[in-house]
Image: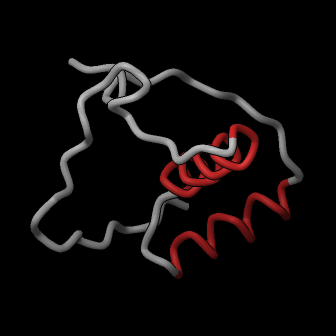
Amino acid sequence: MNPEQRTARLTILVDPRKKSAFVRLCAEEDATPSQVVRRLIRRYIEERTGRAWTAVENGAKAPRRPSQPRVRRALRR
């Protein structure tokens, strides 16, 4: 398993109203909150380093893109 596929847990505390709005907005774009947070982290790293994030440069193989459209998941409430 390459490093880009491994996961590490990041626990944050957030106001319940902000969490609710965030989850709702993520669902509107058919993304999970985890996907959006990963995207935000990647953008932050790119802004701070001034370089595009690439898995290859950071010790992993380039991620493979799914060739089929995603299936929308039901929201957990």
Q: Residue at x 48, y 53 (%)?
A: 35
Q: Residue furthest right?
A: 15
Q: Is residue 6 left or right of residue 65?
A: right
Quarter where residue 65 is shown: bottom left
33 in relation to 28, above or below:
above
> Which quadrant, please, contains the C terminus?
bottom right
Query: Which percent across, then down, holds residue 54?
Result: 41, 40
| Chosen colour scheme | secondary structure
Front one among 10 and 40:
40
Query: Which percent across, then down, holds residue 63?
Result: 26, 42
Q: Residue at x 68, y 45 (%)?
A: 50
> Which quadrant, please, contains the N terminus?
top left
69 in relation to 33, above or below:
below
Q: Residue at x 53, y 81 (%)?
A: 28
Query: Which percent across, then down, holds residue 25?
Result: 63, 75
Quarter where residue 20 is shown: bottom right
Query: Which percent across, then down, holds residue 68?
Result: 11, 69
Q: Residue at x 31, y 29 (%)?
A: 5
Q: Residue furthest bottom?
A: 28
Q: Is residue 15 left or right of residue 48?
A: right
Q: Is residue 49 left or right of residue 58?
A: right
Q: Is residue 16 left or right of residue 45?
A: right
Number of numbered tags placed on the structure image:
0
Q: Residue furthest front?
A: 50
